[in-house]
Image: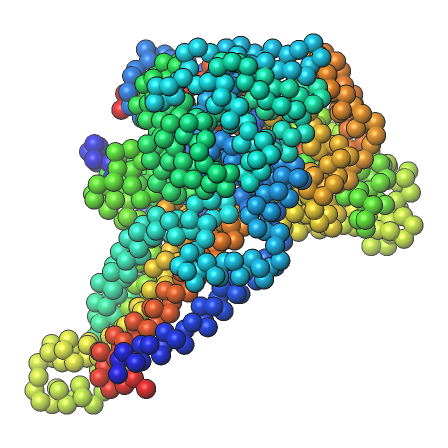
């Protein structure tokens, strides 16, 4: 209960009005228990990693004040504070404040040195990355951070003796890294097996662990040590204080931080039920900032105590046609006219407006518009055009039968679409697609399954007809995960079975050169091919929306303000953030 | 006598608990789920990572082997470690359990304290306006979904009261994120969720007390007591009420496992850091060991709860003998 406010007469009058009117209000419209489950199912996944420029600034209008606390609301609790094991967004957010990495990025995704003195020096053949550490970096116990610590951290994820460490990064590192060597106390050298352009952006942003604390652990102990739940020696802008499981993580100012201590005394990462609860707790001031669910945006937007920041992110929602040879729909979906016509029939702008509450933009290519590799003129485009969809299907020989459903050679244009139950936007998207396709004589039936089942369908089982899901990208424009034929193998994300030797070559060439202009040209080609082939059409790109109470200052604006690539594990804005009341 | 009865009941419950673990294990593995618990659609995860991590976690072993590993650990009192975060399952439970107990005990106490008087008054004033009103409340309590009531209360007592400048109640969590944790702070956080949870108990138990009371009031010994010239107050409270509470004890005893699981929905809506929310979160992440550990734990509580109810029942009613 608020003890600092005297109840006002106005308040009681409003309470009486409320009592009179509450029965007429349609609470269920905005508040659904479904939202609570969404959070656990897939919400966290979507927000794994994101991209681009910061929105409206709230740069310090008053002089920065020392002291006070900032509470951020999150729909998921963290799982671990070990950067080697982490794979979820919530953990990454806290780890990023505890352990500095070699590099980080600006809000728009440009690589910047952090523990490293400068950007990595690459050899002329592009295979050797030499990284020199800063002189003034130290652990919270006062000892310097050295090249040994860096090598040790990467060994946990890369060296064969640590295979028992459950790091999700081993596959990538083993594929690209030949060796990691310590040249001197401040210099470490990564020798690659082949030129791999995304290396620095993708692999040099893991938090570095102190060898003297972790070095004595056996590989299996690394998975289970108490250091994962209560780190002792760290290097980041904040220090660990406590983790009340299911409740909050409390961090305190690191006075010996090499960039200087933050203004804030305390940062609290607080678990909140769902998007609705984030909105509520922002309004009551129980939390100071949190990511806003588009469905509750209208509700918080007009609140005089809150400020809203939004920016584009590198997350898209797409659906895919199962083109695997084993799929019963493979034949109908191998017809390009069918794939294209179905996309023409969908009113994506309508979807973005009504299902995403205008917090999404219609995709014009597979590349996030915030990326330097985005081709805004990718061709062809697919504006909503039912007549064109109909005529394309007619021309391709898919004619309507007595039941109004198109068929060709005895095969009906009839299939099911799957997505994860609980994600209201996705559920509603399938219904919108069902309606749209019915109008062109296509019979599509939505079916909802759990999120893990959906992932298993996409990566392993592959017995679905059409799936719909979200996917998020890192700052590097490489999209091999979805479009390269090698990822049609079990466990890969090209679960729709798109195979094109031309596409494979473009993707391989694009990561095998460090020359950005050349890469850009290749990714432009990639986008044109995908727009023509539409193996898995991109519906919309999502937006990142954050709400903050007015007392939070110094968070946005500049290269390191809150933005596409600085909202989660890289919270560089913590350096300038402060609370106006100093509490 | 009592000791032998208890021992026999405990022995008889072993197959029950064993069966629960077996069914839970079977169901968990029958649903096709995440290939690596806790690791989701991660574009950097490679197929070889999935195979390696599954091997490390023992998930590629044949199911009987996996079950044997788990159950033999359990027999040594080891509930295993979470597959998602590697920490011991028992530590997770013991971290969360006090919060859940705090919430459910408060709700049950509120339930008892409010439902018994309501039931008694309803029985004594049968058919009156007040009785009809209590009936209406009970029906509402049973039929209003608790999550809806919870959201309504949050909207009113937290968000709106805050906006109107009235004293307001926190909308979630067990204590304030910053500077919280003192008893007053915890109690203010407890009010809304405990009220929501108690609402259902009150609805059910007050009906139960009412009908049980009505039945007892028509018994011969009540008539005898009145005939002896005993005051109506003594008849009502000494004879009738005490006897009418016997069946209620069973009902409340059955709520003992609910101490752990009963408030899951309420815990979710109020971001309460309890065991129920833990169970749901981890079920959705396919944290097999955690879900198994929790169900086993609850199964044990059901057994203990029933046993305890039987014993109290016998103490309250000497006619009941341990057969």
Residue found 23% across the figure and 81% down from its top: B317
In the displayed structure, A61 sits above or below A434; it is above
Residue found 68% across the figure and 36% down from its top: A318
Judge from the rendering whether residue B210 lies leftward or rightward of residue A416; answer left or right.
left
* Residue A478 seen from this side: yes
In the displayed structure, B127 sits above or below A563; it is below
The tally of labels here is 0
In the displayed structure, B58 sits above or below B254; it is above
Residue B305 figure quarter:
bottom left
Foreground residue among A480 and B153: A480
Position of the N terminus of chain B, as image quadrant, is bottom left
Judge from the rendering whether residue A62 lies leftward or rightward of residue A467; answer left or right.
left
Residue B189 at x, y = what percent? 28, 44
Residue A536 at x, y = what percent? 74, 36
Foreground residue among B101 and B140: B101
In the displayed structure, B159 sits above or below A212; it is below
Judge from the rendering whether residue B46 lies leftward or rightward of residue A268; answer left or right.
right
Foreground residue among A309 and A457: A457
Position of the C terminus of chain B, as image quadrant, is bottom left
Residue found 36% across the figure and 30% down from its top: A232
* Residue A305 seen from this side: no
Residue A281 at x, y = what percent? 37, 36
Residue found 45% across the figure and 31% down from its top: A215
């Amino acid at each position: 209960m608020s003890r600092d406010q005297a109840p006002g007469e106005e308040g009681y009058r409003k309470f009486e009005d409320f009592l009179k009117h509450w029965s007429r209000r349609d609470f269920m419209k905005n508040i659904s228990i479904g939202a609570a489950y969404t959070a656990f199912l897939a919400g966290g996944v979507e927000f794994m990693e994101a991209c681009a420029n910061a929105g409206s600034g709230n740069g310090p209008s008053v002089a920065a004040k020392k002291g006070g606390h900032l509470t951020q609301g999150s729909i998921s609790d963290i799982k671990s504070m070990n950067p080697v094991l982490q794979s979820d967004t919530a953990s990454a957010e806290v780890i990023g404040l505890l352990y500095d990495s070699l590099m980080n990025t600006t809000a728009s995704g440009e690589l910047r040195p952090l523990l490293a003195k400068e950007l990595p020096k690459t050899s002329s053949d592009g295979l050797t990355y030499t990284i020199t550490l800063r002189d003034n970096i130290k652990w919270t116990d006062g000892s310097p951070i050295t090249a040994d610590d860096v090598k040790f951290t990467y060994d946990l994820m890369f060296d064969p003796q640590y295979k028992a460490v459950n790091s999700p990064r081993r596959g990538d590192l083993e594929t690209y890294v030949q060796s990691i060597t310590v040249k001197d106390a401040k210099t470490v050298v990564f020798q690659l097996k082949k030129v791999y352009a995304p290396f620095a952006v993708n692999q040099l942003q893991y938090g570095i662990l102190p060898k003297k604390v972790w070095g004595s652990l056996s590989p299996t102990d690394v998975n289970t040590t108490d250091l994962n739940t209560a780190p002792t020696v760290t290097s980041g802008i904040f220090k660990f204080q406590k983790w009340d499981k299911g409740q909050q993580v409390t961090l305190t100012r690191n006075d010996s931080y090499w960039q200087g201590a933050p203004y804030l005394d305390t940062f609290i990462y607080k678990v909140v039920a769902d998007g609705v609860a984030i909105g509520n707790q922002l309004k009551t001031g129980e939390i100071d900032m949190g990511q806003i669910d588009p469905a509750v945006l209208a509700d918080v937007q007009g609140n005089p105590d809150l400020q809203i920041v939004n920016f584009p992110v590198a997350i898209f929602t797409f659906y895919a046609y199962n083109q695997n040879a084993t799929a019963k729909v493979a034949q109908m979906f191998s017809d390009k006219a069918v794939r294209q016509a179905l996309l023409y029939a969908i009113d994506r702008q309508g979807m973005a407006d009504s299902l995403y509450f205008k917090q999404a933009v219609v995709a014009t290519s597979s590349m996030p518009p915030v990326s330097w590799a985005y081709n805004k003129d990718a061709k062809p485009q697919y504006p909503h055009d039912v007549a064109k969809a109909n005529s394309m299907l007619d021309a391709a020989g898919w004619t309507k039968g007595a039941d109004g459903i198109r068929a060709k050679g005895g095969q009906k244009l009839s299939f099911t679409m799957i997505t994860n139950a609980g994600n209201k936007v996705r559920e509603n998207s399938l219904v919108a697609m069902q309606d749209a396709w019915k109008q062109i004589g296509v019979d599509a039936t939505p079916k909802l399954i759990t999120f893990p089942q959906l992932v298993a369908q996409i990566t392993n089982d592959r017995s679905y007809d059409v799936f719909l899901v979200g996917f998020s990208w890192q700052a590097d424009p490489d999209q091999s995960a979805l479009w390269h034929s090698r990822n049609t193998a079990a466990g890969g994300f090209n679960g729709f079975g798109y195979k094109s030797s031309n596409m494979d070559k473009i993707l391989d060439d694009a990561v095998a050169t460090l020359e950005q202009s050349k890469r850009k040209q290749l990714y432009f080609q990639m986008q044109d091919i995908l727009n023509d082939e539409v193996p898995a059409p991109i519906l919309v790109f999502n937006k990142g929306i954050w709400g903050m109470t007015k007392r939070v200052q110094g968070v946005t604006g500049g290269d390191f303000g809150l933005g596409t690539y600085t909202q989660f594990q890289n919270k560089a804005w913590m350096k300038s953030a402060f609370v106006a009341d100093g509490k | 006598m009592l000791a032998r009865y208890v021992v026999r009941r405990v022995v008889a419950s072993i197959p029950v608990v064993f069966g629960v673990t077996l069914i839970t294990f079977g169901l968990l593995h029958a649903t096709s789920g995440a290939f690596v618990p806790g690791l989701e659609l991660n574009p950097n995860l490679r197929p070889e990572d999935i195979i390696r991590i599954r091997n490390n976690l023992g998930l590629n072993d044949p199911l009987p082997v996996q079950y044997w590993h788990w159950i033999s650990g359990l027999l040594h009192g080891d509930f295993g470690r979470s597959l998602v975060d590697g920490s011991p399952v028992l530590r997770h439970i013991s971290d969360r359990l006090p919060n859940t107990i705090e919430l459910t005990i408060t709700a049950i106490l509120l339930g008892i304290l409010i439902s018994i008087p309501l039931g008694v008054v309803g029985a004594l004033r049968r058919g009156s306006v007040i009785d009809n009103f209590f009936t209406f409340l009970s029906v509402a309590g049973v039929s209003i979904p608790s999550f809806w009531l919870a959201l309504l209360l949050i909207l009113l007592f937290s968000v709106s009261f805050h906006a109107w400048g009235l004293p307001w109640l926190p909308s979630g969590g067990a204590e304030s994120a910053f500077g919280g944790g003192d008893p007053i702070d915890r109690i203010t956080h407890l009010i809304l969720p405990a009220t929501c949870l108690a609402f259902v108990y009150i609805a059910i138990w007050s009906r139960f007390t009412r009908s049980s009371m009505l039945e007892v009031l028509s018994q011969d010994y009540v008539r005898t007591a009145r005939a002896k010239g005993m005051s109506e107050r003594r008849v009502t409270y000494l004879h009738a009420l005490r006897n009418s509470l016997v069946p209620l004890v069973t009902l409340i005893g059955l709520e003992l496992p609910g101490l752990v699981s009963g408030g899951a929905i309420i815990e979710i809506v109020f971001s309460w850091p309890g065991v129920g929310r833990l169970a749901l979160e981890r079920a959705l992440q396919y944290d097999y060991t955690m879900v198994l550990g929790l169900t086993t734990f609850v199964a044990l509580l059901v057994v203990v709860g029933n046993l305890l109810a039987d014993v109290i029942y016998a103490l309250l009613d000497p006619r009941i003998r341990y057969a």
